[in-house]
Image (cartoon, rainbow, N blue to C red):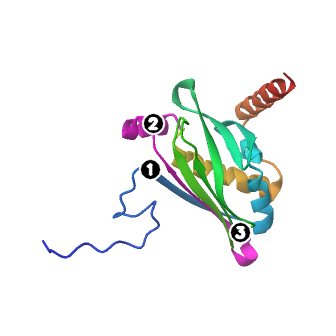
Amino acid sequence: MSDQPRASDDAPVAYSKTAKPDGALVEEAVTIARPAGELYQFWRKQTNLAEVMENVVSITDEGGDRFRWTVKAPGGKEVTWVAAITNDIPERELTWQSEDGGDIANSGRIRFEDAGERGTVVRAVIAYEPPAGVVGQVVAKLFQREPRIQARRDLHRFKQLMETGEITVSARNRRELEKRKEDTQAEQAA
């Protein structure tokens, strides 16, 4: 064996074989045939994301670039946290950080990169601390609630909505979506 230190790889940090982050990292990207500014505007209004993200129960504007997220978790449970936008580069990038006291500590960045005639590459990087560590991450994966799985699905749902104006769903998922909308409307009316 050599005494030389191993050179770091040049892979993105979520895929690096040498980076040792404290929590789990997720990086996903999708190319969307829309201008970056349009995609950024949709994403900037965080409450819009409940429409796109399958496991998000609700996103509430808390004021001051702070948003309360409630998300489905394994076993029919829900987790909640407040995320604050920490950096905003109009039409290019948003970063966020969860505040102390939430169920899941997380942070991330969404970037909107020009892809010429193809539109925009939307790249999401999310760092989070899985509840119950690696065991919690495995359980979440089994229940299809693991952030890497969800990030990939949600970015593709975002692509569908931005390119076609709708998200394709099965009849079962449509009923669940309609019930969620009814529940949200009932909560707002109360």
Percent x, y of residue 119: 74, 70
Percent x, y of residue 173: 71, 34
Percent x, y of residue 80: 60, 34
Disc 2 crowd, CA 10 A, few/some/many (<14, 14-19, 20+) = few
Look at the image and say whether residue 129 sits in the magenta stretch.
yes
Front in this rendered view, residue 173 or 129:
129
Mark 3 or mark 2, whichever is nearer to me: 2
Q: Do the CB atoms of the residues marked 1 and 2 lie less than 8 Å apart?
A: no
Left or right placement of residue 21 versus residue 47 in this view:
left
- The image shows residue 135, relative to residue 29, as above or below, that is above
Q: CA distance from mark 3 to mark 2?
A: 33 Å
* Residue type at tag 2: Pro
Q: Do the CB atoms of the residues marked 3 and 2 lie less than 8 Å apart?
A: no
Tell which circle, 3 or 1, labels the residue nearer the N-terminal end: 1
* Residue type at tag 3: Thr
Disc assigned to residue 131: 2
Where does label 1 land, which residue? 24
Where does label 3 land, which residue? 120
Residue at 75% across / 66% down in the picture? 90
Q: CA distance from mark 1 to mark 2?
A: 11 Å
Residue at 39% across / 39% down in the picture? 133
Q: Which residues are magenta?
A: 115-144
